[in-house]
Image: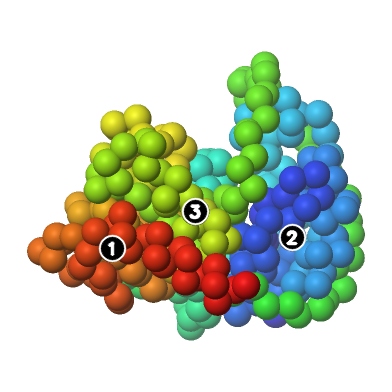
Amino acid sequence: MAEVLVYVDHVDGAVRKPTLELLTLARRIGEPVAVALGAGADATAATLAEYGAVKVLTADAAEFADYLVVPKVDALQAAYESVSAAGSLAAVLVPSSAEGKEIAARLAVRIGSGIITDAVDLEAGAEGPVATQSVFAASFTTKSRVTKGTPVITVKPNSAAPEAAPAAGAVEALAVTFGELATGTKVVSRTARESTGRPELTEAAIVVSGGRGVNGAENFPLIEALADSLGAAVGASRAAVDAGWYPHTNQVGQTGKSVSPQLYIAAGISGAIQHRAGMQTSKTIVAINKDAEAPIFDLVDYGVVGDLFQVVPQLTDEIKARKG
């Protein structure tokens, strides 16, 4: 069976959920070979093996932490050359984060292959892997495949439920030679992100977002309380962010972050196309808006026509009561 390279997103050895989703998808088209880089790479092996990695290629060097993107591309290219030289390689899968898409694009150029970004599903095809994408602000769903070289595919978080499938997970050291471009952009400082205790927005299974209807930063605690009752991440529309009511890092939409959770709750959001582009692939969508004609109701699974200042607190209290 052909092998599938899976780029591992981890923090000091703790594997992040999108990588486990990639391993699950990779098993549909071949045998997953994980590529873990940087500090703690060896510590990822047990988790990766649990979710189906037959082999784990690891490398650690100061370049991975001290410089941006290119050293990781060098390493992934080395993994590609090593695996493809030893046998058949079906695809290279990378998490669809901002960094992941840059790594994937640079790799595709280097190896002369086609690339598909922001896939939401993956299946085996007679002529290679077939990726499903949600395009044109999620108005259409397309299926496509790469026709030149080894497919390089980035997959959006929450595209598949991680499924354990224990495999060997044999750890092998990956030999990496860094090119001249690897040290072109140096990281000069880092500032730790202040933790809110909530899930990462793009990876969360549940997202609660507030929009113009929240009517001020002082009212966003209503949205946060509902999110916390559900163990959810907090998002915001562009209107709310532009007004300074919530940080830009929490913006959901075409110029913000794209999310695809199991449950998306939009409170006080009209549903402009800019916002819909960032959340329309959510599995279940619930909207709360006092305007019965708001465009958001055109795509929801459940809609509540009402004042969010009355509905959201009642919903929060009901959730807490059922959980308590």
The three-letter amino acid code for the residue at tag 2 is Ala
Q: Which residue is mark 2?
A: 34
- Residue at 30% x, 75% y is 302
Residue drawn at the location 31% of the way across and 60% of the way down: 310
Disc with the residue nearer the chain's start (3 vs 2): 2
Q: Nearer the viewer, residue 74 or 196?
A: 196
**In the figure, is residue 3 to the left or right of 286?**
right
Q: CA distance from mark 3 to mark 2?
A: 38 Å
Tell me how far mark 2 sits from mark 1, CA to CA: 42 Å
Crowd band around label 2 with a 10 angstrom C-alpha radius: few (<14), some (14–19), many (20+): many
Quadrant containing the C terminus in the rendered view: bottom right
Q: In this rendering, which labeled residue sits more in front, label 3 or label 2?
A: 3
Q: Give the image location of residue 87, x and y in percent.
A: 73, 68
Amino acid under disc 1: Ile
- Neighbourhood count class around disc 3 (C-alpha, 10 Å): few under 14, some 14–19, many 20 upward: some
The amino acid pointed to by label 3 is Ala
Q: Which residue is mark 3?
A: 225
- Tell me which corner region of the image, top left, top right, bottom left or bottom right, holds residue 322: bottom right
Location of mark 1 (residue): 288
Q: Where on the picture, by quarter, is residue 183?
A: top right
Q: Secondary structure at mark 3?
A: helix
Report the residue at 40% width, 59% height from top: 313
Cα separation between marks 3 and 1? 15 Å
- The crowding category of the residue bearing disc 1, from other C-alpha atoms within 10 Å (few below 14, some 14 to 19, many at least 20), is many
